[in-house]
Every structure is written in structure tokens, then in C-alpha cells.
Image (cartoon, rainbow, N blue to C red):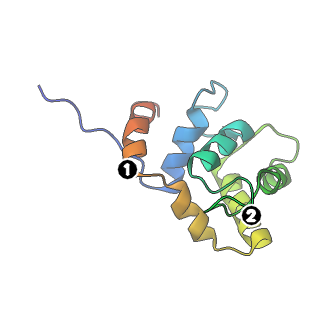
Amino acid sequence: MSDPVPIVPKTIGEYFRVFAAMDDPESDNGHRISFKNVRRWFQRAEIMGQPEQDGVLFQFSDLRYAFCRVAKKRERIDCDQFCQMLEIIAREQRIDTQMIVQRLKVSEMMASSMSRLFEGQY
């Protein structure tokens, strides 16, 4: 019997569920993401950091600000709120939301390694 074909996330919603569930038993099976996992995702996509870094679109404080605006006092946000957060960042930083989305959709190699987390979780 051959190995099953790995499930590779394709949409931002599928990536959201993978990163939401990563090391977080309180993620409601990937339906809510913590700031810690949002930060981890953005760092892996190399779009957040210090202004002098190549490819960086915004800083940690910008991400924290946008997350807090949509989360209010909650520790986790859902996918719709995550998309609202992306719009806030894009508007504040004067960048295209789709540019952020494309950068968040990590390379196929990384997505394949993540597929074990994604497979059978939902």
C-alpha cells in the first residue's frame, strides 16, 4: 500500500487552521489563533521584524496593535477577525493586503512538512 498523498494547505483559511492548532490545545481545533501563533507564522514568512531587515513589511508592534484591535480583550481570534487584522495592517502600513496573504502562504516545502499537523485535525 502506498503512502497517502500529504494534504497541503492552499487557502489562507487552511493555513490559518494549521498555525492556529500548532502547539495550542485551546485553539478549538484550529478555529481560533493566539497572538503567539500569529507572531510565529509572520516570523516564518519573514514579513515582520526590524525595519533594516530585507523583505520586512512591518514591525512586531504593528502586528500587536492590529491583533489587539480585533481581539479586544480575548486571547484568540477566529479566521474572519484574522482577515480584519490583515486589513488593518495593510491600511496602516500602506501595503496591499494580498501581498501579505501571498507572503503568509509559505513555500511548498514548508507546507508539506506542516501537512502532518493539518491532516486529520478537522
The picture places residue 33, in percent across and down from the top left corner, at 66, 40
98 displayed left or right of 49: left
Q: What residue type is labelled 2?
A: Ile
| Residue at image coords 24%, 38% | 5
Q: Residue furthest left?
A: 1
How many marks on residues? Answer: 2
| Residue at image coords 68%, 73% | 95
Mark 1: few, some, or many residues within 10 Å (few <14, many ≥20)?
A: few
Residue 39 versus residue 8: which sits nearer the camera?
A: 39
Residue 61 versus residue 24: which sits nearer the camera?
A: 61
Q: Are marks 1 and 2 in contact (CB under 8 Å)?
A: no
Q: Which amino acid does label 1 sit on?
A: Glu
The picture places residue 91, in percent across and down from the top left corner, at 76, 72
**Mark seen at residue 89:** 2
**Disc 1 or 2, which lies upstream in sequence?**
2
Mark 2: few, some, or many residues within 10 Å (few <14, many ≥20)?
A: many
The picture places residue 37, in percent across and down from the top left corner, at 66, 38
Residue at disc 2, secondary structure:
helix
**Mark seen at residue 62:** none
Provide the residue designation for mark 1. 108
| Residue at image coords 49%, 48% | 14
Quadrant where the image shows the N terminus? top left
Is residue 40 positioned above or below 52 on the image? above
Is residue 35 positioned above or below 45 on the image? above
Residue 81 versus residue 88: which sits nearer the camera?
A: 88
Res 38 quadrant in image? top right
Residue at disc 1, secondary structure:
helix
